[in-house]
Amino acid sequence: MKEELIDLSKAVTEAEAEHIIEETLEKYDKYVNPGFARLMRFLGTTVEVKTEGPYMYDIKGHKYLDFLSGHGVYNLGYCHPKVVKAVEDQLKMIAQTSVRTVMNKPMADLCERLAKITPGDLTYSFIGNSGTEAVEGALKLARIASGKPQIIAADNGFHGKSLGALSATGRPLYRDPFKPLLPEFDHVRFGDIDALKAVIGETTAAVILEPIQGEGGVIVPPKGYLSDVRQLCDDTGALLILDEVQTGMGRTGTMFACEQEDVTPDIMTLAKALGGGVMPIGAFIATPKAFAPFAEHPLLHTSTFGGNPLACAAANATIDIIIEEDLPRQAAEKGEYFLEKLKRMQDDFPGVITDVRGKGLLIGVEFADEGLAGSMIFELENEGVLVLYMLNNPKVIRIEPPLIITYEQIDFMIGVLYDAVDKYKTLMG
């Protein structure tokens, strides 16, 4: 007989909470991943039971203010009621369609919305399930559209961990165990147009970049860099793929980060916040010229669950909310306020905080070393604030709250971080 599941929505005693945490850890150890279970034990983890707005609640009843946003998923906060309702309404009609001989209206509506909100002549979208899946499709499209093999990416860039996306990702820690990866991938220094000029040529299918490197440590390129890359691609006949999986949907102060340099890529990838924090979804959108091979042969690239009505309903609602609530403007204004406060903190703690940088509400705070950054993460969590380091640069704490975050909540986080850094400096003398 199957064991009865515990209803985690009900209040539990401290002893019951500890039992649930231990039981969950044991299941992680036996059935999920023992290495991850060891890490969770080391971190002194808990079990999340509820999320709402910018808050996460754990099994012990603790409330955490989320300045991580699931690596940029929760631009609208958790469980935005309009997104939840859109999904619930769709669920009552049809949840999943795989009959390709009939049309899917939510997906058609979403593709239309994407064509209208993206810059330039980006027109045709393929809807998948994740960011790495969007990157895989974009890379395939670039090679078939150009008829060329070479893909140029950036050192320390992050595009996902499936085989094709990993070939573009620029951190050896993730790449080396799986070599040989896909051939004809080259990496250059991000923000250095001369480095790109040295390797781009007649065999280049595409250049793939993040407009701002996220997992690389919130690296903002020099002004004019993206425009120069666009011109270089035009001069050599290479396609430009911009990975806006993390920077898109208002995060950096405009709907898409590339708009800040008035640059339109040939292909753009999206995911994370596109599903409103309720449904997983990814997409790539291309110009008619770049998309032509997939238009001619529409079954060359398909996905069983891609474009399912539930995910598309969530994405449609998400786009509407971002526009209605003017979240890109909010991100720009709150981000400017946040950065100013953090830079003042950097001035107060030279040698501890080595840099503060970002755009909108994608902010990185760089510490003197990885251990110090890790200590700050623990200190903040103990005070009810969730942050994490960047995957490709562990010295950098990501500050990536929901775009609905309030100024009062920003001030609270600033105060907690200031006290944590001050405590460290006092201990170190």
Image (tube, rainbow, N blue to C red):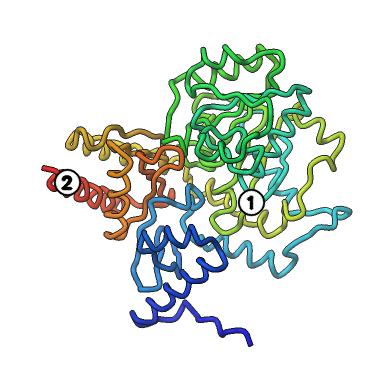
Q: Which mark is residue 244?
A: none
Above or below: residue 270 compared with residue 318: above
Q: Amino acid at mark 2?
A: Asp
Mark 1, residues whose alpha carbon is within 10 Å: few (<14), some, or many (≥20)? many
Give the distance between the C-alpha atoms of the residues marked 1 and 2, in whole angstroms.
Answer: 41 Å
Mark 2: secondary structure: helix
Single out the residue that lies furthest toward the right. Answer: 101
Compared across the picture, whether 380 is left or right of 184 comes to left
Residue at which label 1 appears: 281
Quadrant, the C terminus: top left
Quadrant, the N terminus: bottom right
Above or below: residue 150 compared with residue 109: above
209 or 368: nearer the eye? Answer: 368
Above or below: residue 290 compared with residue 414: above
- The residue at the point 85 percent across, 43 percent down is 299
Mark 1: secondary structure: loop
Compared across the picture, whether 206 is left or right of 248 comes to right
- The residue at the point 50 percent across, 66 percent down is 29
Q: Amino acid at mark 1?
A: Ile
Q: Position of residue 24 (x, y in %)?
A: 48, 71
Q: Which mark is residue 422?
A: 2
Above or below: residue 16 compared with residue 364: below
Label 1 or label 2, whichever comes before in sequence order: 1
Q: Position of residue 139 (x, y in %)?
A: 69, 33
- The residue at the point 52 percent across, 71 percent down is 27
Mark 2, residues whose alpha carbon is within 10 Å: few (<14), some, or many (≥20)? some
Find residue 276 and report its image quarter.
bottom right
101 or 118: nearer the eye? Answer: 101
